Amino acid sequence: MAPVRRGPQLPLAMAMLLLLFGAVWLWHLDSVALSPPADNIEQLTWMRSLEWGYYKHPPLPTWIMWAFVQLAGWSAWSSYLLGSLFTLVSLAIFSALLHEIHGRHYAWVGLLAALGITFYNGRMNYYNHNIVLMLWVALSAWLWWRILTRPQRRWWLALGVVAGLGMLSKYQYAVAAVCGLWLFVRHGLWRSPAQRQGLLMALAIALVIFLPHALWLLEQERGPIAYAMQSSLGAQFGPGQRLTATARWLLDWLFNRCLPAVLLLLLVWWAQRRARRQLPSPSGPQEPHGAAVLGQSLLWCWGLLPPAFMAAMGVLWGVDLQLQWGTAFALWTVPACMAVLGLREATLRAGWTLPVAGVAFVALQGLLVWQSYDTSAFGRHPPRSAHWREFRSQALAEAVAQPARQELGGPVRIISGPAAASGAVALWLPEQPRVLIYGDPALSPWITPRELERGGILELWPPGEGPADAHRVLDGWGWRVRPPAAASGGGA
């Protein structure tokens, strides 16, 4: 067996590319959006109190946002920076793993292709549970590589921690756990007492980390499980709908989200074919060494099993597969495609193969930036249907803030209304008000019952909704205030 490389190796040039890539896309996405992503607003709203869970999702991403805000301040840009940090670190781990398994040129091509996946460029400014999950999935792949090639107890300990944090981020981490168990069985690790003990130890650590949230879940009537049942797991599609919806989901994954990556890899495959003709023919059959076999097995597993498992959920159980569910796993589609196309380190380092990949990367990224600008509110072909990033949150905030302050007799402290719109307006106000989501205290534990009794709340209503006495402003949005109890003659 060939010696395994001693540690993750991310060339400096790759790190610099990731930083430049992140900076360019963050600047661009901020310049073409009138409102931050709704998922970012959600996290900036929820972080006003630290809970063991929130009405839609587990708590860890919100806890991380709270910690980051203590350093960077409460703003849309804090969420942009945090989201891009998780995305770039995940891509760095991915690249380092490809470098260890197959070599530097293979890792370069894999990274350039992965950066074309639209989950990671057009959503570079996103911060949500899928983005946080992506890091735990990448770390899990790296740890399984260590377990397969250099089995030690510390890797199992680390895997247990990562698995627990993954489940505290999004229950979809279970898909990564299935990948790991497949590797455990596929490569006969169950035959080793030390490996069996390691797996049990990892499971125990993960359960201990997840246990407080699990106990919290048991007490909830409107928690994440209920939300999942209402939004996707409880869809109960019929047989025809299951097949159609699942096929559409898979096609979106490969030929929409991953299309730029696939195009780049096809160009590299064409260039590699030309390079092969210039290389001397091998003297005999070239069998991959043991570490390469293990590495390729891991990459196949991480690339194919997640979409296959989720597709099975759609076909067998009628789950409404959400398009964003590919976020944490789509980058691992790249090495699977590279294996299908027969891309190898030896030929990737020959001829003009790598320069072709670089030129294709620059061209594709330029097209993606242009398409993003051209379909924004500032471009020539804005979307015909309403898109959140075209929501004029700053204009709405300016239209309601001063009149509301006059009626309240002071600053706006609480905004009640739709989650995304209210949170977006709050981001533009210097007093940084908290959001009472849909006016429902059960969804907003950061606001106490006493505060609700006291009043002093700005209420927002979408166009066509709300009471008759609501003031109508921008695009039909309505507002009114619930004055403080003292101002309205009530008790303190």
Image (cartoon, grey):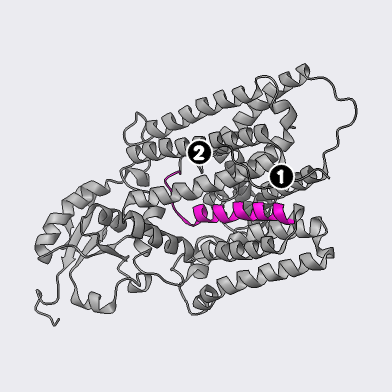
Q: Taking 397 as reference, is 375 left or right?
A: right
Find residue 18 and name its label: 2
| Residue at position x 81%, y 55% in the image | 187
| Residue at position x 63%, y 54% in the image | 242
- Whether residue 176 is in magenta: the answer is no
Q: Taking 171 as reference, is 79 left or right?
A: left
Find residue 5 and name its label: 1
| Residue at position x 23%, y 75% in the image | 451
User: Which element type, helix, strand or loop, lies under badge 1?
Assistant: loop
Tell me which label, 1 or 2, sits earlier in the chain: 1
State the quadrant of the C terminus: bottom left
Q: Give the x, y percent position of residue 105.
A: 66, 31
**Looking at the picture, which amino acid does disc 1 mark?**
Arg
Q: Taking 404 as reference, is 188 left or right?
A: right
Q: Give the x, y percent position of residue 53.
A: 46, 70
Q: Nearer the viewer, residue 298 or 227?
A: 298
Measured along the vertical axis of the image, is residue 9 above or below residue 455? above
User: Which element type, helix, strand or loop, lies under badge 2?
Assistant: helix
Classed neighbour count for the residue bearing mark 1: other residues with Cα under 10 Å, few (<14), some (14–19), many (≥20): few
- Whether residue 146 is in magenta: the answer is yes
**Looking at the picture, which amino acid does disc 2 mark?**
Leu
* Highlighted magenta segment, given as a residue range: 124-147
Classed neighbour count for the residue bearing mark 2: other residues with Cα under 10 Å, few (<14), some (14–19), many (≥20): some
